[in-house]
Amino acid sequence: MSENRFNFSETGNRLSAACGIVELMEDLGRAMSGSDGGTMRMLGGGNPAAIPEVQSVFRQRIAEIAANSAECDRMLLNYDGPAGSPAFREIVAESFGKKFNWQITADNIAITAGSQAAFFQLFALFGGTANGRPRQILLPIAPEYIGYADQGLSPGLFSAHVPKIELRGDHDFKYHVDFERLAELHDIGAIAISRPTNPSGNVLSNEELARLRQVAQRLGVPLIIDNAYGLPFPGAIFTDAGLPRWDEDLILVFSLSKVGLPGVRTAIVVAHPEVVQRVSAMTAVIGLANNNIGQAIVGPLLAGGELFELARDVIQPFYAQRSAHARNAVGEAFGSRFPYRMHVNEGAFFLWLWFPELAIGSRELYRRLKERNVLIVPGDYFFYGLAPETEWRHRHQCIRITFSQSESVVAEGLKIMADELALIHNC
Ligand SMILES: Cc1ncc(COP(=O)(O)O)c(C=O)c1O
């Protein structure tokens, strides 16, 4: 980052000086745009895959809108209310309410400019100082989504916790919430989880979720669940863990991004009307209104149930198949050349790999692989918010790779990675 010509505020610095992750995002951006010459094997990033059947549905919707000048003009010409289009909010309340048997109305729905923005708004509402005391956002399991890490308006926003690790067979493992660690906590403003979890592909079980709701109740705070990869869309979830019954202590966040519309920057928050009003007011303050285009594309698809069907019949099987392919490719490439474990892949677009004897650390592995034209995401970044005294080698031994890119890219990238890891482990 360039040098000190301007004297930025503490908050400004906190929100803009995250050098490591910014560099990483720039690498990913270059690889996705092809500006690196198109040679990089892109195993980083959280971009959805191009699924032709899905893309054609969205293209068709855009053609319908463009062909209807009244609808098109309405979409382009009007600022929506900051909570989102009233008609779209009605559709969401009705379609989600019917599908999941929830008692919700449009007053329970806020639209935001993507779910990244929703989390910023929610963390600002529930984290930070209240009644003169600093409050944190509790992350029951580290690792957790990298995108939350630098969202704090105040320092030390997150209180993240080491999970229990269950080893399975020779090469698998799974994280579980260590509820004993959560027993004594106080000064918590909200609990947040991504489910499925980015990066690990973990899906907290229904029982873990029920226990987290009890913890939230004891603390008197909401439980925020980030469903970016989960139900009802894109539905990249490979266990039978369902969505919880919604009630007013739960805040559920859904995104249009991972179904294949990251460009429209649209997410849906389902919450108590008081939270909805606050989120909506923040949207007005920060950006006046939301993007209308995602709501216009998806509205009829939600009203008719087509989006739910697309997720169930096309998107879910697509990612389940990609996941199976990537897991096989890991087995084939790594064999028994060096010690490794893979988190059981219960959802999302990623494999989370653990190298228990990786002495060089995951950032150096990232650097070496980048030199060999393979882009991964080093795991360190996902372990923020742990107590400073936490000594835990595991946090430097994991990496995330995506399987949303083509199967050949994933297989090639894994072969190169295996060669590099064999070199590292033998010297
Ligand atoms: C777990 C998780 N939550 C939220 C987001 C933010 O997505 P968006 O702002 O596109 O809705 C992402 C994006 O990668 C994610 O992985």
Image (cartoon, grey):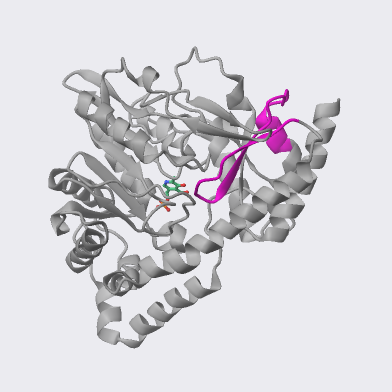
**In this rendering, is residue 419 above or below 89?**
above
Residue 276 location in percent, x, y? 18, 48
| 211 is higher (above) or lower (below) than 25 | above
Q: For this rendering, which residue is in front, 111 or 242?
A: 242
- Residue 58's image quarter? bottom left
Residue 87's place in the image compared with 325, above or below, is below
Q: Residue at x 54, y 40 (%)?
A: 22
Is 365 one of the magenta-colored residues? yes
Question: Going by the image, does 237 lie left or right of 297?
Answer: right
Q: Residue at x 37, y 68 (%)?
A: 307
Q: Quadrant of residue 203?
A: top left
Q: Quick one: which residue is furthest to the front in this view?
A: 169
The x and y percentages for residue 392 are 57, 18
Q: Is residue 40 visible?
A: no
Residue 113: x percent and y percent? 33, 54
Magenta region: 339-367
Residue drawn at 42 percent across, 81 percent down: 60
Quarter of the C terminus within the rendering: top right
At a point 25% along the width and 84% down the height, the residue shown is 70
Residue 377 lies, with reference to residue 263, above or below; the image says above
Task: Say left or right for 160 vs 334.
Answer: left
Q: Nearer the viewer, residue 173 or 134?
A: 173
